[in-house]
């Protein structure tokens, strides 16, 4: 089987050594196995190898039990889709729910949908992006859009507004911060400011390994007193001694 995997990780499951893989640098991991003459694919719903392997263990056990019981219908909830929705189908569903249950203003919904279509036109060169499969929505597509937009002379603010919908740059920054907080919160469930905890940990690591000046530069503090006030207690005695 020919693949273009860029990241393959092997792990041990019940004496065997299956592998998980992904094709995008920041994409979710997948797993494939053959059982009962069937080739099964499963998205492991995480770009983090440790979490993906945990999901893989559960899926491998589920498929093995289904095969042993000859109850293949059990595989439906854990099997990956073999077909993808189109961009047009996704946008149709979005427009219906956004103006109904979610109650987003109709003009905002239309603008969001058109921004996605324009992004895909630029990135893929396709005149009618509604016919594209949903698997075109990758980091690679976004990066291609950015590169092509820059080469055509489009402003950075215009590029950013197509990627993250917001009225102002400040609002866009807040949206990104909330998204990063949601991501980090799965690893720090008991912390109210997850992204800040990550920043604090990174700043403390720079201080303890490279010194106070490096930490100040890394954190973007104008004054060393700010860095010392919040991060000095994390430094090791060896590094803090001047």
Image: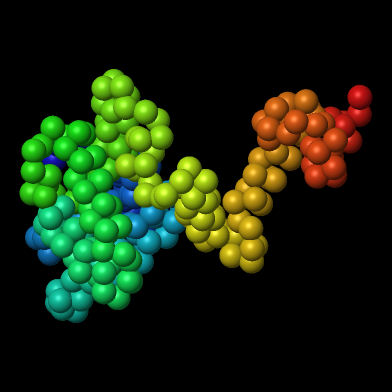
In this picture, is 73 found above or below 215?
below
Residue 226 x %, y %: 81, 38
Residue 58: quarter of image: bottom left
Camera-side residue of 102 and 60: 102
x and y percentages locating residue 99 in the rendered image = 26, 69
**Left or right relative to 218: residue 45:** left
Q: State left or right for residue 197 relative to residue 100.
A: right
Between residue 75 and residue 109, name the one nearer to us. Answer: 109
Q: Quadrant of residue 140?
A: top left
Colour convention: rainbow
Residue 140 shows in the view: no
Quadrant showing the C terminus: top right
* Res 191 seen here: yes
Compared across the picture, whether 22 is left or right of 128 comes to: right
The residue at the point 27 percent across, 33 percent down is 145
Residue drawn where x is 79% and y is 42% of the image: 231
- Give coordinates of residue 149: x percent, y percent: 28, 28
Which of the two residues, 170 or 178, is positioned nearer the viewer here? 170
């Amino acid at each position: 089987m020919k693949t273009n995997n860029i990241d393959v990780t092997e792990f041990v499951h019940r004496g065997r050594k299956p592998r998980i893989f992904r094709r995008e640098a920041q994409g979710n991991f997948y797993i494939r196995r053959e059982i009962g003459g069937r080739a099964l694919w499963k998205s492991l719903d995480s770009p983090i190898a440790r979490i993906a392997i945990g999901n893989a263990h559960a899926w491998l056990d589920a498929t093995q039990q289904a095969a042993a019981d000859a109850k293949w219908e059990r595989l439906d909830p854990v099997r990956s889709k073999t077909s993808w929705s189109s961009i047009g189908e996704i946008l149709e569903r979005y427009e219906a729910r956004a103006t109904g249950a979610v109650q987003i203003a109709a003009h905002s919904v239309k603008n969001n949908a058109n921004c996605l279509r324009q992004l895909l036109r630029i990135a893929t060169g396709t005149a009618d992006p509604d016919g594209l499969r949903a698997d075109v929505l990758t980091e690679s597509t976004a990066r291609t859009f950015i590169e092509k937009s820059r080469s055509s002379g489009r402003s950075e603010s215009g590029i950013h507004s197509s990627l993250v919908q917001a009225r102002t740059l400040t609002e866009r920054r807040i949206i990104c911060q909330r998204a990063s907080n949601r991501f980090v919160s799965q690893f720090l469930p008991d912390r109210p400011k997850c992204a800040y905890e990550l920043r604090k940990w990174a700043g403390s690591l720079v201080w303890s390994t490279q010194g106070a000046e490096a930490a100040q530069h890394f954190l973007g503090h104008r004054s060393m007193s700010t860095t010392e006030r919040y991060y000095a207690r994390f430094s090791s005695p060896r590094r803090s001694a001047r």
